[in-house]
Image (spheres, rainbow, N blue to C red):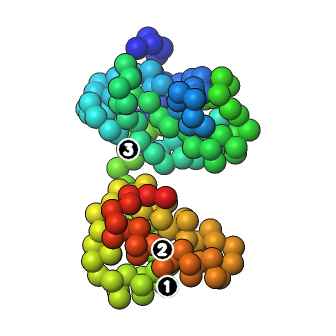
Amino acid sequence: MRKTPIIPMADKVKFDAIILQHQDMNAAYVEFPFSTEELFGKKGQVKIKAIFDDAVEYRGSLAKMKSPCHILGLTQEVRKSLNKTFGDRVSVILWEDKEERIVEIPEDIAELFNKHPRVKELYDAMSYTHRKEYMRWITDAKKPETRENRKSKLIDMIISGKKGI
């Protein structure tokens, strides 16, 4: 753990980090240089909100992934918004996210879930991230027929136990 002083900002933590690449994948993360146990009273996953480079907001988790410290993933979307990639330095302000994580369900999907209550039950049991991915996958469809196609695939994917897109 780096012994950089924590800058108190009403329970916010600020640090700079290098964007690291996970193995040879197009997956990025930064190392959290402090003890989550000391700061948040938690050893495992910590749900957080973050702001990168005072510009890009993100909602995610600090996780211990067979690594010496907790890490925070940076999605491709975040990196694109920052115009940054592996090896670049990023400033991070983060704080614990104690708000309930709610995914808005469009009306047509809610109707679909009403017709398939078991699918809705399985969907509700998924993590926030997986629920969000499913809804984004459907709502990002550019053509109505693509959206309808994805809605019918949604049922099969959830029934088969597929957690996310």
Identify the mark nearer the N-term, 3 or 1. Answer: 3
Give the SS element for disc 3: strand
In which quarter of the view is residue 47 placed? Answer: top left
* Mark 3 surroundings within 10 Å by alpha-carbon count, few (fewer than 14), some (14 through 19), many (20 or more): some
Amino acid carrying mark 3 in the image: Lys
Is 139 displayed left or right of 123 in the figure?
A: right
Give the image location of residue 43, x and y in percent. 26, 30
Please say if the residues under marks 1 and 2 sit with CB atoms less than 8 Å apart. Answer: no
Give the SS element for disc 1: helix
Which residue occupies 40% across, 73% down? 156
Give the image location of residue 60, x and y in percent. 45, 45
Q: Nearer the viewer, residue 151 or 36?
A: 151
Q: CA distance from mark 3 to mark 1?
A: 30 Å
Give the image location of residue 135, x and y in percent. 50, 68
- Image quadrant occupied by the N terminus: top left
| Residue 55 in sight | no
Foreground tag (1 vs 2): 2
Amino acid carrying mark 1 in the image: Asp
Is 144 displayed left or right of 160 in the figure?
A: right
| Tally of numbered discs | 3
In which quarter of the view is residue 37 placed? Answer: top left
Q: CA distance from mark 1 to mark 2?
A: 14 Å
* Mark 2 surroundings within 10 Å by alpha-carbon count, few (fewer than 14), some (14 through 19), many (20 or more): few
Which residue lies under the disc numbered 3? 47
Which residue lies under the disc numbered 2? 153
> Which numbered marker is on residue 108?
1
Identify the mark nearer the N-term, 3 or 2. Answer: 3
Is 9 displayed left or right of 26 in the figure?
A: left
Give the SS element for disc 2: helix
Identify the mark nearer the N-term, 1 or 2. Answer: 1
